[in-house]
Amino acid sequence: MNRIGEKTVTFDKQPRIITSYTIVGPLEGLGPHALTFQEIMPDISLGQDTPEKTERLILEMAIEKTLQSHNLKAEDIQFLIAGDLLNQIGTSAFSARGYSIPFLGIYGACSTFCQALGLSCMLIQGEFAQKVLIGTASHYQTAERQFRYPIELNIQHVATNQHTVTGGASAVISVDGEGPRIIDATFGSITDYGLKDANDLGSAMAPAAFSTLKQHLTDTGRGLDYYDVILTGDLGIQGSKMLKLLLEQENYSGLERLEDAGVQIYGTNQQVGAGGSGSACVAVMTLGYLLNKLNSGKVKKALVIATGAMLSSLSVLQGDSIPCVAHAISIEG
Amino acid sequence: MNRIGEKTVTFDKQPRIITSYTIVGPLEGLGPHALTFQEIMPDISLGQDTPEKTERLILEMAIEKTLQSHNLKAEDIQFLIAGDLLNQIGTSAFSARGYSIPFLGIYGACSTFCQALGLSCMLIQGEFAQKVLIGTASHYQTAERQFRYPIELNIQHVATNQHTVTGGASAVISVDGEGPRIIDATFGSITDYGLKDANDLGSAMAPAAFSTLKQHLTDTGRGLDYYDVILTGDLGIQGSKMLKLLLEQENYSGLERLEDAGVQIYGTNQQVGAGGSGSACVAVMTLGYLLNKLNSGKVKKALVIATGAMLSSLSVLQGDSIPCVAHAISIEG
């Protein structure tokens, strides 16, 4: 079996991220890691008449430029795995129309990127594919409209609110070629501690990140200090604090290795509440910021843990708690 | 490679559907195949105060009874793959809370069931799992509220409207045990012929079903008459007519093998427009009606093709066409 421990799957074919493309919005382009993204949008709309159409265009651009940058055609790819935050993953379905590639739609909220990455590796390790294309995108305005309030209402945010990243990312995972290798993955189960505050998703998601991280370390026999970087996304300031508390309670060492995509993407000078979120956040930070460090040798071993809050506007209105999930992917340079 | 032809994946481990459970609503319980379902709901609400909570309960019951019927525990299962029609697949995420099983959320609209089945088999064939639990559910009232109009408005339906099935289904796919075997699967790409009528999803989905069916037959070198039954779901009356026209145009023989879950589930005497739909429709018809025939030997070889219309209420309001997808799974008794 391609498994170790209770819940971790391993890939001895070590699939590689052979090419990728990241696009971010203007605000994200003012952050400290802007130079690690391939493209910064000149404005928030790209000339589209709704933000939903902009989000779709971002993903189309990310996918197309990922393929172009490696001279790949649709026929070279066996699966397209994509998902996003919008109802019925509209962004992904519409963006996939141009490609005659078998489409697997997924939904994991902000954990979508790691779910796509992990699934890709299972399809490659299982000899169902040689190359898998993955993609995700999110947009501040579409997320505000769908999950919170239309921006025009100018509703005051609270400090624990996260700011949905405008951006998109795509990558090709391949059985051969050059690029960082994916070694193993731990998929998390739905974790729900009963938290109900949709304005504090970081706190709701922290236990899911904790549970998956703990499982990953147990299964692999590694400590936090096995990794040069453990990139969570997107717990934000509040959720990252919670995750560290949970780890400290159980005496884990190596907490200084923890970084969070949501905390880092906007830097410290922008007014974005508890930081960034959205399915694009951990995706652009992994394929931009982290890949940059892996490719330059500054980081040799990294763990990416993407967490998703599986709430809907209706579940919040119906008084439900927030089910969360987290998936961890180990990447080596 | 575990592949044949251009887009078909094969499973020489032949994963089996070792146990399953189907629940349907009262209306579905009046249909001609009612006796093949394990449970018929006494009423549409099951005592819940919103239909969303009922839908969730249906899926929880289906999952729990699937496990119980085979004396399985969460620890015996390596993945739970689930999806549904609701925004952010809320039904699946909430229903999965009770299980410490790694969760993979998917979205394929009414094609969700075949996507889950196909993914399960890839995880088993790829030696990532020995047993995978899958589940899906839908509810007439939740779907009406989300995709059309709240029922209270009493909006007149048109003849091409399909009636979302109230029901849920779950199954365990296993590398060993007894039960029908899954042989291969063809995953479809997003197909969009530009149709925009959200009241005629059958016509929009027929080209996706056609494209995947054609690809499956080409890849496997089979004709329609290789199968005793080809169960589409859920094209409804209108979509089934379209699919047959497309097949006739290219001179396929064996069209009499085609059946549609949406056409059959309510029979001919109920007023349900063009028939049933919803992610539960093809799921309960496969795990109820078809499994019954496979287990009794009346059917030896079957192909199930589930089609999904990936529209959202917002994409319709923004004037978009309807992207569709279809996945085919070949099952032998």
Image (cartoon, coloured by chain):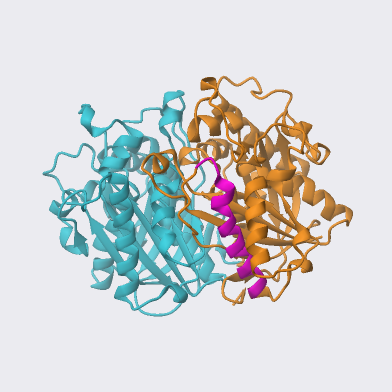
Chain colours: A cyan, B orange
Residue B78 colored magenta?
no
Q: Find residue A330 and report its horizontal and vertical position in percent.
A: 40, 62
Q: Relative to A166, say whether A75 is above or below.
A: below
Magenta-highlighted residues: B198-218
The quarter of the displayed image where residue A204 is located: top left
Residue drawn where x is 21% and y is 49% of the image: A45
Q: Find residue B123 and report its horizontal and vertical position in percent.
A: 60, 62
* A179 with respect to B69 (left or right): left
Q: Find residue A245 and report its horizontal and vertical position in percent.
A: 33, 39
Residue drawn where x is 23% and y is 27% of the image: A153
Camera-nearest residue between B173 and B280: B280
Q: Relative to B155, say whether A177 is above or below.
A: below
Q: Relative to B183, say whether A165 is above or below.
A: above
* A70 with respect to B136 (left or right): left
Residue drawn where x is 51% and y is 21% of the image: B153
Q: Residue furthest left?
A: A269
Residue drawn where x is 51% and y is 64% of the image: A102
The prevailing secondary structure element of the residues shown in magenta is: helix
Q: Find residue B57 and report its horizontal and vertical position in percent.
A: 62, 30
Residue A57 visible to an observer of this rendering? yes
Query: How many numbered discs?
Result: 0
The quarter of the displayed image where residue B141 is located: top right
